[in-house]
Image (tube, coloured by chain):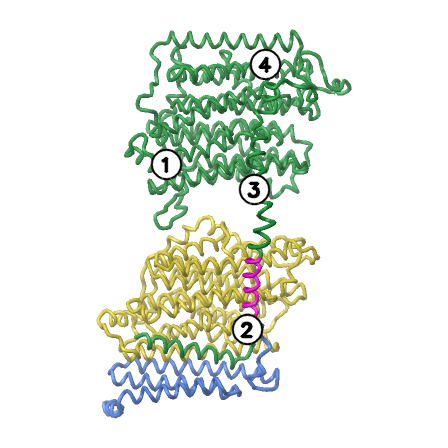
Chain colours: A green, B blue, C yellow
Amino acid sequence: MFQNSWLILLFPLLGFVITGIFSKKLTGKTSGIIASLMVLASFIYSATLFFQLKQITNSAISVDLFNWINSGKLSISFGFLIDPLSVTMMMIITGVGFLIHLFSMGYMHHDERVNTYFSQLNLFVFSMLLLVMSSNYLLMFVGWEGVGLCSYLLIGFWYKKNAFNNAARKAFIMNRIGDLGFIIGLIAIFTTFHSLDFNTVFSQSSHFISGEAIITFITLMLFVGAIGKSAKIPLFTWLPDAMAGPTPVSALIHAATMVTAGIYLVVRSSSLFVLAPITMDVILVVGVTTALVAAIIAVLQNDIKKVLAYSTVSQLGIMFIALGLGAFSSSLFHVTTHAFFKALLFLGAGSIIHSLQGQQDIRLMGGIRKSMPITFITFFIAVLAISGIPPFSGFFSKDEILAAAFHSSPIVWGLTVITSMLTSFYMFRLLFLVFYGSYRGDSKTFGKIHESPKIMTIPLIILAILAFAGGFLNIPVMFGGTENFATFLKPSITFFNDYNFEIPNHLNEILLALGVLLLIIVTIFVSWYIFVKKSVLPVSDSTNRGIISKFIYRKFYFDEIYNFFIIKPYQWFAEKFTSFIETNIIDSIINGIGSIVVFVGNKARLIQNGNIGFYMFVMIIAMISMIAGIIWLK
Amino acid sequence: MENITSAIRIIPLEHYLFLCLALFSIGVIGVLFRRNTIVILMCIEMMLNSVNLLLAAFSSYRSDPSGQVFVFFIMVVAAAEVAVGLSILVMMKRNVDSIDINLLNKLKD
Amino acid sequence: MFSIITIAITGVLLLYLGFLKNRWIYISVAITGLITALALSVFSWNSLETSFSNMLIIDNYAIAFNSVMIFATILIFLLAPHYFKGIEKNVPEIYALLMFSLAGACMVTSFDNLTMLFIGIETMSIPLYILAGSKKFSIRSNEASFKYFIFSSLATAIFLLGITLVYGMVGSFHVGDISNYFTITKEIPSILKVGIVLLVISFGFKIAAVPFHFWAPDVYEGSPTLITAFMATVVKIAGFAAFYKLLSTCFILVPDSWHHLILGLSVLSLIIGNLAAIKQKDVKRMLAYSSISHTGFMLFAILSFNSFSASSLLYYSFAYALSTIAAFGVLMVVKNHMSADGSVQAFEGLAKKNPILAIVMTISMLSMAGIPITAGFFAKYYIFVSAIQGGWLWIVIIGILAALVGVAYYLKLIIAMFAKTSETEKIVTSPLYITSLLVATVLILIAGVLPNLIISLI
């Protein structure tokens, strides 16, 4: 069973090849079915692996398919590491991925390049699976680059619009900056451990003491890679722009799976990260700032997908807070529940956008809950889940992180609570503005609003069930649970030596949770008061805003700052380079070399004059001089 | 047999060596400067035969028969080579009605 | 051993089958014989075998190279029926001669006695003189044939003189005795050194290393393209395998007497081969010069004898053979169907109507240029690694520069196929033909992704 786990990779690859090669021949429906079935097959296989893995005690199985690269000291096998961590990620990727494939069949059915879409989506699933299944850093890097490529392709899927292409390029470049860190990290790992294999590296890591410089360097570089992929400050601005892609893509790649790759990388390398307290602090700081900043920005956004995008950035920040605290399994638990409810939110948004013929501005929505009941109910469940209302899944996962934060530092806890309050505020703002009140768009289109077809609502319903029940995977001890999820993951993760798995006083924890819950309910009430009772609408773009509001609305001027400090000077330099150095110096050197090459080439051809006698003559001269040379030398 | 070997050894080995190298060089020079392809073929034969002579000399000086066996191989191969070479000449003669080597310069850069 | 015999018997059989006048019988018999030979060769893996009073030794080194060569021949034979379409005369004879030449090539890689090396080389070369001239009424083919004959004969004579001088000093043709001689003798007579130099020079002729390369572009251009493909792959690989084996077994202890020569041949081949290729308009000539530059790269393996160089040479041979066959395969049909001269212009706009041919050619060019995920990349990578391990950093730098120059002319062809807009007609090929091209292409990619399949063999 485990030996054949490469089949999981094969299915989506097959889907990619089939839908890619026959993209001109297949109908959109057929390619959708093929692509979905391939992902479903992978999901079923992953689930089987999951149940098998639960039964064995030593639950980390290495599957080496063959020796991949072998040169000098570098020996890398093409192999997989099947352990609780990777199986969990595989289940999320294929499970959520399958639902999103289904949804796409409805959402994309009128697009003319739907076959290309499905083949790229399958390629993404393949690369993402490769990323989480690989048993060494290099193979992981191949998957890492693969998902970056697919993300680039799918963001720019509607390539005819220039803005979308720019968004795709921005995502690609920012990811590349992160990748550079990853590559440096890889090289550092190889020079330190002489291997890139997970098992070898992690077993050797115990020889290092905590805080050693090289480990700190390695982990920092890996974290730079994670920053790029998981959209953290300072490399987060690509994710909101990435919403240019089709909405199901945003759901799969930019909410549920790819952006969590950074978290996977940190958790996978946990035995290195626990040796680097400095890195952990950096992660914590970056996580807290990102979570807070993104949440604040989200409050004033008016594009339904942008709100969700900033919410994703903020939630990823919360996951990184958990990582920084050493609560790796809590972080991964939040990854799981977040995958459910954020995918649901995005698909819900997709369903709304689909029904409103592409309208994304929430100022032009409102009052559509009657026309789209299923979308409304499922969206509502997701909002409850992300806000952390019990017993929805978000409550459990966020509560764990808050508890861990409270134990280590009250400030972190406080900031995280503020982030949660902001989260529930803007999520309910979104909900109220979209579904309540009266319709503010073009009155002619109101009659056309309809519930989406079954192929789109069924994934919504399934995800809603998961978003509701996902939290029961890991019921904390204080509520009489056994923390199944954490126990299952435990073998794959290295924790701090003094990391406390159990929190002794349950009463404190319950009180804490209740307090936070109270704050959140108050926030929701405030949101209700503002947006339903008073029917306050977000101001239009032409209205003058106050300084702070403007500051937030313009996303803290991150793009402008990058533009001013990096892009502008870069362009200036580039221009100067082309006008002066390039044309005057480099060009003349290159042209000079080029013409020398051509000149010598011409001369070399002259020798080849077709005359046998001449050839013989040259050869014999060469021969005689060689013999003479050898005798001369001694 | 003993007599022949000892007869060969009357002349010092160096002399054989010089003779053969001289023959070989004449062959090389012939290939270089002659324009008639048949003469070129003959020059190649001369080079091969100078090697044969040298092999025979070495063989008898070292009392090792394998050198002389090698001579037979060379003779067989040389015969095959000449057969092929002559047939190429015939083909050439049919096509261009000449066996002058300088006519063969259609193929060049 | 049985594999060589099978090849030879298939050749004889083909001569008799010529009476049947059915070209499908020839080709099926030839392919069957080759596949049997390949199977026999592969199954004797790890079983060291000596025959003819230890004159022939078939070890894993020989088996690996033989298998590559037999496989390359199979691919070439798959191209043959389409190539000889419409030509009825003498086809079985051409097949038979190719078989005999291949049998010689297989002997060359497995010699354990210089006699066998000589016989192998001649068995390999003599059929090729005829094959090069097999277009009997084409003056260019005549010229190619004669040039090949004259230079090969000269090389043979030099080779024989070299062997004789070595024999005169060592007293044996046997590889083991020769290497023993050098372990015992400290002071090497200069006549022996001359012998070694002559051997190196004669191999320089065979593998077309600069400055002994002059015959190659002309012969490659003038010969029928199918034969050129055979010469550029099988013959060259056999030459390299034998050259490597000769130096590594007999003369490994006296590197002084040949190291500088190899260095010079290698650097000159890289420079001249690449520079001359740039300005070529005729694709066949361009490939000939590119083949000379590949000689320069492959000589790195000989330069840097270590545990790794044999396998890097094998990998390079494999990658090079596949790319060359694919390239010549596409060239053949383009040349015949366009009523064109086989210049770069003939390839313009090929991708429009003949996407498969264009893709095959592209991958083959990328592989020759050494772009990643093709076999050519790892071929260059391994050969460079092997050279660096041998301490030849500066020559690797020259190699990298040469490879960069090489990219220019390979890309020229790719750009012509995809970017230029002139229309071409649809080229009709047979399924066998396409199969051969696709097998070569897929293997280029597989070997480019999974280099370990081959590199770990020997």
Q: Where in the figure is residue C124, as x and y percent of width and height?
A: 45, 72
Disc 2 and disc 3: Cα gap in Å? 44 Å
**Same subunit, tags 4 and 2:** no
Q: Which of marks 2 and 3 is in front?
A: 2
The nearer-to-camera label among 3 and 4 is 4
Marked residue nearer the N-terminal end (3 or 1) = 3
Disc ID at residue A17 = 3
Q: Is residue A499 above or below residue C448?
A: above
Q: Nearer the viewer, mark 3 or mark 1?
A: 1
* Whether residue B3 is situated above or below residue A479 in the rendered picture: below
**Per the image, is C100 magenta?**
no
Residue farthest right in this picture? A444
CA separation in Å, label 3 and label 1: 30 Å
Q: Is residue C39 visible?
A: no
Chain of the residue displaying label 1: A
Quadrant the C terminus of chain C occupies: bottom left
Residue C232 vertical position relative to residue A429 in the rendered view, above or below: below
Residue marked by disc 2: C218
Please tell me which of labels 1 and 4 falls first in the chain: 1
Spot occupied by residue C395 in the image (x, y as percentages of width and height) = 41, 61
Residues C406 and A157: in front is C406
Give the prevailing secondary structure in the magenta stretch: helix
* Residue A83 at least partly seen: yes
Q: Do the residues bearing badges 3 and 4 touch, measured as CB atoms within 8 Å?
A: no
**Which residue type does callout 3 highlight?**
Val
Q: Is residue A591 magenta?
A: yes
The residue that label 4 is drawn on is A428
